[in-house]
Image: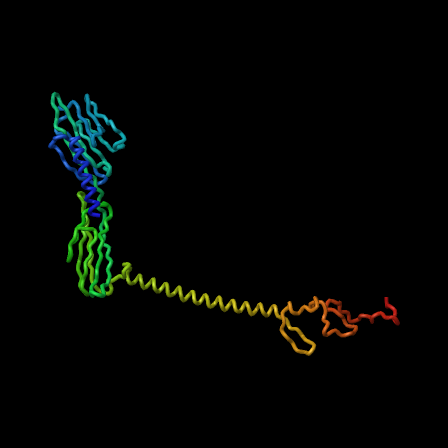
């Protein structure tokens, strides 16, 4: 990350060098301004208004405002989009609500009565404010060394590329700090993040003890205990549910067997459980006729005969019908 940041700074420096040569030439009036996002930049002249006949304000060689023949006007309205304020009384300009893209080289080229004034250049750097700084800590136990290894990270809200500074038992200038402590040893560390427009500091006390150690993933012990308890509870609940489902399935099977099994009374007087499909003999079921126990009498011959206790005897050759 430092190599990338260094490369970006080098490239930006080269670009500024060529822009300075084009905009300011050999001018010695070069000022460097560091501004925060949302602040304002004031562009002032060095002499009274009456001394000038022509004034041009530029940003990276683009003329965005001009004073000529007693008139002050904006030439590039889209460049600052209603954020440019002009004062005709002293020929001063103000760029309000600065943004990152406003960074660059502002130059003022002015002419007077038979006079060419030295070009005034302002190199502007717009930075975001550092709003908050926090320290994140992960620690592991090195069994072979009998020591705690800590990994500290400085988290910054705001500027994406601030400068870092660690202080305490160990010092550093990077975003991360790694070190080891013996058991029961503690120390206080400070992380300071700063840029040209703001600075913030965070503090953390670390101690090599059983309570301060996280596992390799950096999770606190209480969180690991909670997760383990949740997993164990889930396993127990799943086992109870499975046992209940198996018991219920078995009960349903027994019930179904009771429904499909019938008592078949054999001629010998013994009862045997048979299935309904096995009770069909010669294509007839027990619902049609009972052949094995058929008794020749005047009683109903089938299950579907209408029972009538006053039924007349059957009509034979020697009898006549009562009807």
The reply, left or right, for residue 262 in relation to residue 170 is right
Residue 198, horizontal then vertical, whole percent:
19, 45
Residue positioned 88% across, 69% down in the render: 320
Colour mode of the rendering: rainbow
Quadrant of residue 169 within the rendered picture = bottom left
Location of the C terminus (image quadrant): bottom right
Side (left or right) of 248 relative to 188: right
Q: Position of residue 255 (x, y in %)?
A: 57, 69
Q: Position of residue 92 (x, y in %)?
A: 18, 30
Which sits in the foreground, 95 or 169? Answer: 169
Which residue is rendered at x = 73% and y = 67% of the image?
304
Q: Nearer the viewer, residue 158 or 153?
A: 153
| In the depicted structure, whether residue 190 falls above or below residue 42 | below
Number of dots carrying numbers: 0
State the image coordinates of residue 2 (x, y, percent, origin top left): 20, 47
In the image, is 289 to the left or to the right of 22?
right
Asked if one can make out residue 50 in the rendered structure from this viewpoint, the answer is no
Identify the residue shown where x is 20% and y is 64%: 147
Residue found at the far front of this picture: 282
Asked if 82 appears above or below 5 in the picture, the reply is above
Q: Of residues 154 and 323, which is closer to you in this image?
A: 154
Note whether 130 is above or below 116 in the view shown: below
Question: In this view of the protein, which residue sits in the foreground, 251 or 143?
Answer: 143
Does residue 107 show up?
yes
Q: Quarter of the image holding residue 16?
A: top left
């Amino acid at each position: 990350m430092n190599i990338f940041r260094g490369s970006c700074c080098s490239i930006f420096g080269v670009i500024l060098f060529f822009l300075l040569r084009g905009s300011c030439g050999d001018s010695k009036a070069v000022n460097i301004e560091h501004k925060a996002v949302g602040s304002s930049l004031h562009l002032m002249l060095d002499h009274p208004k009456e001394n000038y006949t022509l004034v041009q304000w530029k940003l990276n060689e683009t003329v965005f405002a001009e004073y000529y023949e007693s008139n002050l006007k904006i030439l590039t309205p889209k460049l600052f989009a209603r954020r440019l304020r002009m004062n005709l009384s002293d020929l001063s300009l103000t760029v309000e609500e600065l943004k990152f893209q406003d960074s660059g080289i502002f130059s003022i080229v002015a002419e007077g009565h038979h006079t060419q004034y030295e070009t005034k250049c302002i190199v502007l750097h717009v930075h975001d404010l550092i709003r908050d700084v926090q320290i994140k800590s992960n620690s592991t136990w090195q069994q072979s060394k009998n020591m705690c290894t800590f990994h500290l990270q400085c988290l910054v809200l705001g500027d994406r590329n601030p400068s870092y500074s660690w202080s305490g038992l160990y010092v550093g200038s990077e975003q991360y700090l790694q070190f080891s402590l013996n058991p029961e040893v503690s120390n206080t560390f400070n992380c300071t993040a700063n840029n040209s427009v703001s600075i913030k500091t965070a503090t953390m006390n670390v101690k090599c003890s059983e309570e301060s150690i996280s596992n390799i993933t950096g999770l606190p012990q209480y969180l690991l205990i909670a997760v383990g308890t949740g997993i164990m509870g889930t396993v127990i609940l799943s086992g109870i549910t499975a046992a209940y489902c198996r018991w219920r399935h078995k009960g349903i099977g027994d019930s179904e067997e009771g429904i499909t099994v019938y008592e078949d009374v054999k001629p010998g007087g013994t009862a045997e459980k048979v299935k309904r499909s096995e009770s069909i003999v010669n294509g007839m079921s027990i619902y049609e006729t009972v052949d094995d126990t058929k008794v020749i009498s005047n009683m109903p011959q089938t299950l579907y005969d209408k029972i009538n206790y006053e039924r007349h005897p059957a009509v034979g050759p020697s009898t006549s019908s009562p009807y």
